[in-house]
Image (cartoon, rainbow, N blue to C red):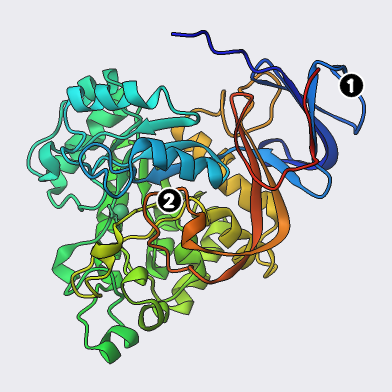
Amino acid sequence: MTEEKKPGSIRIAGARVIDPSAGVDETADLLLQNGMIRGIVPPGSGEYTGSETTVIDGTGLAAAPGLIDVHSHFRDPGLTYKEDIVTGAAAAAAGGYTTVVCMANTRPPVDSPEVCADLVRRMRDLPIHVRTMANVTVGMQGKELTDMAALKAAGAAGFTDDGVPILDERLLMQAFRRAKELDLPVSLHEEDPAFIRMAGVNAGETAERLGLGGACALAENVLTARDGLLARETGCRVDIQHVSSAVTVRLIRFFKDLGADLWAEVTPQHLSLTEEAVPRRGAMAKVNPPLRTEADRQALIEGLLDGTIDMIATDHAPHAAYEKARGILTAPSGMIGLETALALCITNLVRTGRMTLPEVLGKLSAAPASFLKISDHAGSLAPGIPADVVLFDPAEAWTVEASDFHSKSSNSPFLGETLTGRVRMTIAGGRIVYSRAMEGRITPAG
Ligand code: DOR
Ligand code: ZN
């Protein structure tokens, strides 16, 4: 094997440097050295201005910690016609992500140390940091717990049966106890099938008009209430995944007040769209849990603002074109998200005046780092931590096109839409892993 060259020094000059973890938001130069953050200095100042430094003109761009996604599906092993770890990592880098945690509903699922260790080994060679969760239950059948200690030893970042709710509350409580001992989180897909007539579409006005059964918010509320209680009882770090309804937000607030170590994520799609997207976009807007009402969407934003919802996570869920073409009734649920997440947040939260750019970036980097307990080496621009950086133009308008995606799949309900805010460069461990439209802005070292 050839020895890989060490990353040299990089100066990102004159950018709007934003580090939500430290309250930094100023025009400055960001210095990277040997793959690490060296510091934030006044424009043109500081060390390493010499010819050994690559200078990147950051004028008009924002530089922030590389984004961290706690919830993506890279479909590897077994479903690699939809995505694999290489294309998933490429999509992530193009979206400004430098750390991604993959869900475990693969084929086979990540329910054994062997599958987990193989995945972890292959993920090491990727240009960004990719980790995997392991399953809570064997075969995601909800009947028997996996060997959680062995899965941790094999490198699992946490536990989830995402895609499938865990219905046996005694078993789940046991899982919480073990995860707590192992100091790893459990992430939960909260939808009780008892209240679902058809998954992927909200049981409301739109579903009725279209003659579809639908999935109601109660399905999410019931399991969130149960699991808020179990989280409080056990002290386990629990993440309520892709929160979709206003009542769930209130429940999470309540259990946080009671002292549960409860965390919550919301997706850019649930922050951007409502059930009204279903008649317009058909199966592309089918997702579990479903897009709901405008009142729900507003409650999700309120939840983000008051800290009830900690993180923005993509739930990047690639599916093949022929699968989505089956139509709303039988198409699989889910949509890709890594390459549109930042733009959707800027377009629908920042440009509408609901959140500031640093607030949004905190939900996309510092908060997920805290949840994963990796803040000592990710999610900030603190000197000495790995140089994971996203450089983006917060004002660039662009139209979402399938041909631009790095993902293997293009199942996005945002195709054809014009969004604002676009990634220009992603740096992971001091190496440029993605770059576009940077001509004339890069002066190489030497
Ligand atoms: O819509 C969804 N699709 N929700 C999930 O929780 C799983 C995901 C998938 O794996 O396709
Ligand atoms: Zn899910």
Residue 197 occupies which quadrant of the picture? bottom left
Indicate the amino acid at tag 1: Gly
Q: Residue at x 27, y 50 (%)?
A: 227
Precedes in sequence: disc 2 or disc 1 = 1
Identified at 28% across, 66% down, the residue is 324
Q: Closest to the observer: 166 or 268?
A: 268
Numbered label attached to residue 264: 2
* Residue 201 screen position, x and y as percent: 29, 74
Q: Amino acid at mark 2?
A: Ala
Label number found at residue 46: 1
SS at mark 1 in the image: loop
Residue in view at x 66 percent, y 58 percent: 421
Residue 119 shown left or right of residue 60 in the figure: left
The reply to whether the residue tagged 1 has its Cβ within 8 angstroms of ligand 2 is no
Front position in the image: 325 or 366: 325
Q: Which dot, 2 or 1, sits closer to the camera?
A: 1
Element assignment for label 2: strand
In the displayed structure, would residue 151 be above or below residue 229?
above
